[in-house]
Amino acid sequence: GAECDFEIVQTLLESAEAARATQQADRALAYSDEGLSTLSSFFKGASRDTLLSSLDGTQEKVVEVMDGGEACEKSLDALVTEAQLRQLRGELLLDLGKLSEAEQELEIARTLSVKLCDDVAVGRCLRSEGMRLLMKKELNKAEEKLEAAVKCCHQAEDPKEEAATLKLLIPLYKATTNRYDRCCECFHQMLEALQAEGDMEGVSATLLDLGNFRLNRHLNDTTGGSELEFAELEMTDLDLQGALQYYQENGGEDPSQLPEVLVSVGTIKMLLGDQAASVAALEQAKQLYEEQKDDDGVERANGLLSDVKRIMDKVDSTSVTPIG
């Protein structure tokens, strides 16, 4: 009966998710197809369309339908499961590079999720649609979808999804000229989301990424002979110090992270005109790279150590705007 069918569908959804988690996309797709066809027999006649037309995207309507008795509640559950299956199917098709099929599934999943007032699912669909557009190199459209997804996840108070979406948006803005400020805002949003999740490893990696992003901007400004804003440099220094403290206390997932932070700290201290701190950080980085037998790292640290003197002279001749 319908009762039994519905339990089978739930099991198929779980199996599909487990198969995807172990990179078995084809198997996951087969489970999700079976789930959807089993689900279609659950809805009698036009009951699915009737249910959909009675929903208007507000929480009140969803509650009203749920209060209509057990059969209505079951139908609503079936609709939620269909949205989950279609979303998963859309993501799997993306994994397999089947972009136009993925677009159709994600469109249906998002429409259902909007009707069901499920902001988290809507945000995730928008993120996947953004990924599809990134894969198609349609960057402006991808940006719109991803920005909408960030907004959705933020409203739904789902920091994990929000951070995952910002992770796609940041490289897009990094690669685009004139989006420096928005990119920094995204970094800060991401830091807030990761902190809310309690993901301190993620926070530190993001601080390092943000520090390096800002640092490259400062270095380009120096090369271009632009004035360096002291307050800007100090903000970058703070980001990098935050990452440095974490990696010194906890190590990282990757042993190359600590010397990388030290190289960046050495560079920012150099730009701030603190030669002693710059040399100390670079010497420490060099030592770690030597211990890790990372010749490229050693070479980079050595190059910067010899630059310190040269750039110190250049910074002396470029006026750094002090904070008045």
Image (cartoon, rainbow, N blue to C red):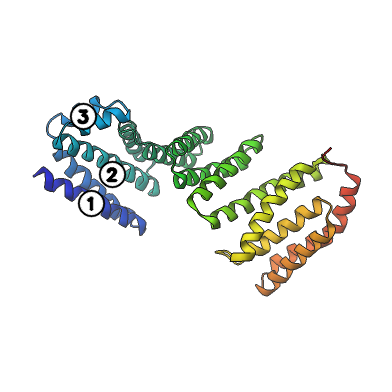
Asked if residue 111 shows in the view, the reply is yes
Q: Secondary structure at mark 2?
A: helix
Disc 1 packing (10 Å; few <14; some 14–19; many ≥20): many
Are the residues tagged 3 and 1 within 8 Å (C-beta)?
A: no
Residue at (37% x, 45% y) in the render: 91
- Report x, y in % for residue 145: 47, 34
Q: Secondary structure at mark 1?
A: helix
Disc 3 packing (10 Å; few <14; some 14–19; many ≥20): some
The residues bearing labels 2 and 1 have C-alpha atoms spaced at a distance of 9 Å
Note whether 161 is above or below 118 in the view shown: below
Foreground pick, 59 / 152? 59
Note whether 14 is above or below 289 in the view shown: above
Q: Amino acid at mark 3?
A: Leu
Please tell me the numbered disc located at residue 85: 2
N-terminal-most mark, 3 or 1: 1
Q: Amino acid at mark 1?
A: Leu
Are the residues tagged 2 and 1 within 8 Å (C-beta)?
A: yes
Mark 1 — residue? 12
Please tell me the numbered disc located at residue 51: 3
Q: Amino acid at mark 2?
A: Leu
- Report x, y in % for residue 39: 18, 42
- Report x, y in % for residue 141: 49, 32
